Amino acid sequence: MSSTFRFLQGVHAFAGSGLEKPSALDASLTYVVPDGVRAQVLYFRGGNSSGELVVVVLLRDGVPMRYFPVGARGDVHVPLRVVEDVESGETLELQVAAPEGVSGSVVLDLGLVEV
């Protein structure tokens, strides 16, 4: 069985609208599982330049799947040991939620494997 690695990554500016209101950052942070394969999320790494806690939200078909809090001027690395298949045609997207009025940049790296 062959596998292909995929990554949603980059440095992206954000402006907060409230921790309960995640917002899209960039189209490059969206991934649609190709026909005939499944995907599995392997890890998440993220950093936050702002002086406040932000939350990176992993959405699956528009529904929150995982929340990754990233502390003020901090970083996080989360190896995802629970294997959860994401089926063909499903969409994954990273969004960021931050307190209203907070702005900064996030460094994001989400690793996936197609099987």
Image: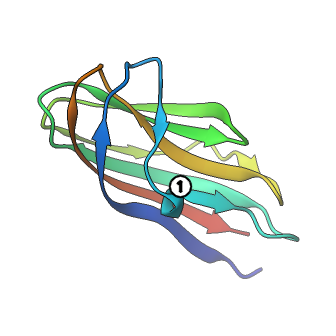
Q: Position of residue 95 (x, y in %)?
A: 47, 41
Which residue is more in the foreground, 40 or 8?
8
Q: Amino acid at mark 1?
A: Leu
The residue that appears at 61% across and 66% down in the rendered structure is: 113
Q: Would you place residue 108 above or below residue 16 in this image?
A: below
Q: Is residue 44 left or right of residue 63?
A: left
What color scheme is it? rainbow
Residue beneath the point at 72% across and 82% down: 2
Secondary structure found at label 1: strand
Q: Residue drawn at (78%, 62%), measured in percent from left and top?
A: 38
Q: Quadrant of the C terminus?
A: bottom right
* Image position, residue 19 (x, y; %): 39, 19
Q: Is residue 21 above or below residue 15?
A: above
Residue closer to the observer: 4 or 25: 25
Where residue 97 appears, as percent x and y from the top left, is 39, 29
Asked if residue 2 is positioned above or below residue 45 in the image, the reply reads below
Tell whether 104 sits left or right of 7: left
- The residue depicted at 63 percent of the width and 60 percent of the height is 31
Give the residue at mark 1. Answer: 42
Residue 37: x %, y % from top left: 81, 68
